[in-house]
Image (cartoon, grey):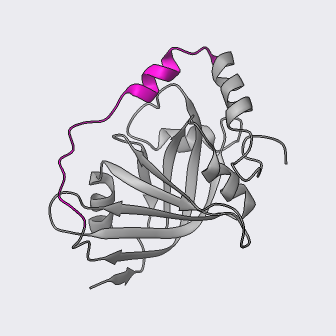
Amino acid sequence: MGKVYEGIDDRLREFILAQPVYFVATAPSGAGGHVNVSPKGGTGTLAVLGPHWIAYLDYTGSGAETIAHLRDNGRITVMMCAFQGPPKILRLYGRGRAVLPEDAPFAELVAAFPVDPARGLRSVIEVEVERVSDACGYQVPLMDHVGDRDLLVRWADRKSDDELAQYRRTRNAHSIDDLPALSGP
């Protein structure tokens, strides 16, 4: 039922880009701390950059667990589920990093996306994919995608650049386990 692939081929790329929602899982090093799973989505927010390379647009949010965990150990899994059509679950295991606006590759990465990023873009999460595998997805329900939400974009549009920066300094500086996210070393 499940299969491990050499990398992301054209067929898998098509599947990945067709999914309106994907899930990102990270965890801190060691036995303590919280495992984090975040739903992500929005048309054009994930890009397949090569057979072993993906990236997604990371917008300002209520927490910064993924960034903190990637700074801690780099481990990340991205999962897509087919909610329409034939059943399938696809997992991309790898090492990731948050590329911030002040980092040299930021503009080049943003240019790889088919959409202009909305206000509130905090970073681009870049993943070097080490393992690509699928599972049957027989238990995943069929669901209809009604559309993308625009609430996060509208929220960010109501804020000035200074207000967004202040929000990140106060709400995205550390993870819930007090690991640095958008703060110091």
| Residue lying furthest left | 85
> What residue is at 22 percent from the left and 57 percent from the top?
83
> What residue is at 77 percent from the left and 50 percent from the top?
178
Give residue 59's position: percent from left, percent from top. 53, 36
| Residue lying furthest right | 185
Q: Nearer the viewer, residue 119 or 82?
A: 82
Residue 127 appears in which quarter of the rendering?
bottom right
Q: Is residue 153 above or below residue 95?
A: above
The N terminus, quarter of image = bottom left
Residue 104 counted in the magenta span: no
Residue 142 counted in the magenta span: yes
Residue 59 relative to residue 106: left or right: left
Residue 40 relative to residue 99: left or right: left
Residue 182 relative to residue 142: left or right: right
Q: What stretch of residues is rendered in magenta?
A: 140-161
- The reply to whether residue 8 is in sight is no
